[in-house]
Image (cartoon, rainbow, N blue to C red):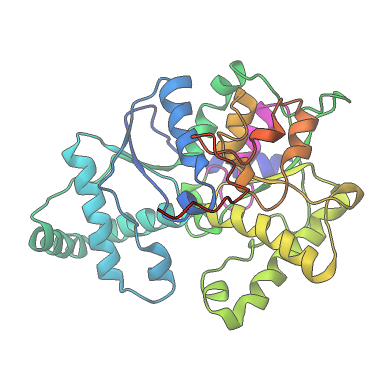
Amino acid sequence: MQNLYTVNKNYRKEIADDKYYYARSCIRQNFFPGSEVTFLNILKNDLQRDVFDDPRHTTCTGIAYHSDVIPFNTIQTVVARHFALMSEHGYENFIASCVTSFGMYIEITETWKHFPEQLEQIREHLKKATGREFLLPKNIAHTSDIVYKYRTRIAEQMKYPLINAKTGKPLKIVDHIGCHYAKMFPANGEGGAEFTQVLQGMIKAWGGATVDYPERRHCCGFGFRQYLVQANRGYSVSNSKKKFESMQPYEPDAIVANCPGCAMFMDRWQYTLNEMQGTRYGADNTMIPVLTYEELAGLVLGYNPWDLGLQMHQVDVTPLLDKMGVPYDPNEKYRSRSGRQIGSYTPQQSR
């Protein structure tokens, strides 16, 4: 245990307290659209933090870069524009919703640190393309770092802890860390690559128990090119299957991930594997609900599950809500804000 403690102590990162420039995720908004809104609500309303959500922000192009679609100079210039927008609004602390984006911001700023001539070249590219100039962020963090930093504050406002309301026992939660959070640059992940604390810290602070299993740090199965190329998708689903089979004996109540792609793939592939093989990996032949950390934080704070967007998940989340004692109206599950039932279709009369 002493060795584990030493590793964790050596990988403690600085996380800014306030005044954040927020970079959205291009895929999180599509997979689980309630997550980013929930994060902003928690920061602004529950934690009273200053966070700026910039409508001019764009994708970082990280997936395209890692899929060899665009060159490194291009993504550096895109990231430089993001830093320019941050500088123009007077912010210095940059927080990214996507772990791929987070990894790209770290990779690029580390490149500029070691190769200042590259930084000057990108400054010229950005000036020529947009007329903008930029300052480097004082602090770069992933948004899960921010929730982790304020996990105790959230616990103080908690309405529904991660405890089985019927048995009183802690719920067993699998934490899944996105590969680009700490595997590329371990010093930039809280706890490093192998003993990452960012999600474990939330789970424990909110009353749950973490699940350790052999494939805990194995890839979720996304892997970009192993999914984006249709012929490779067998590799993608087999990676997810390996993880599910490894965690199955421990009968987890839920999975929480800090990467939007990881949450989506572990949610969708469970449905796919059930359709392909009739296999379910939860206790008593059930599926395992998969949540983003924003959704998990929203649940413990008492947010309406349907406002969180939990109806967008492929694996039904209501068994977890029942265990936590979270109230919900099943009739509202697929109702839009205007009151229309999205799950049903009524043809419009021709005009």
**Nearest the eye: 253 or 344:** 344
Q: For the image shown, how many numbered marks are present on the structure?
A: 0
Residue pushed farthest right? 284
Give how far across and how far down residue 80 sits, in percent.
Answer: 23, 55
**Nearest the eye: 85 or 218:** 85
Task: Tell me which corner region of the image, top left, top right, bottom left or bottom right, holds residue 171.
Answer: top right
Task: Tell me which corner region of the image, top left, top right, bottom left or bottom right, holds residue 21.
Answer: top left
Task: Tell me which corner region of the image, top left, top right, bottom left or bottom right, holds residue 207.
Answer: top right
Give how far across and how far down residue 187 sits, in percent.
Answer: 48, 49
Q: Magenta stretch? A: 190-207
Give how far across and how far down residue 241 sits, in percent.
Answer: 75, 65
- Residue 12 visible within the image: no
What is the quadrant of the N terminus in the image? top right
- Residue 30 visible within the image: yes
Residue at 78 percent across and 27 percent down: it is 163
Location of residue 341 with respect to 125 vertically, above or below: above
Give how far across and how far down residue 58 sits, in percent.
Answer: 30, 54
Residue at 69 percent across and 70 percent down: it is 237
Q: Find out whether residue 203 is within the magenta segment.
A: yes
Residue at 56 percent across and 36 percent down: it is 308
Residue at 59 percent across and 41 percent down: it is 341
Q: Find out whether residue 96 is within the magenta segment.
A: no
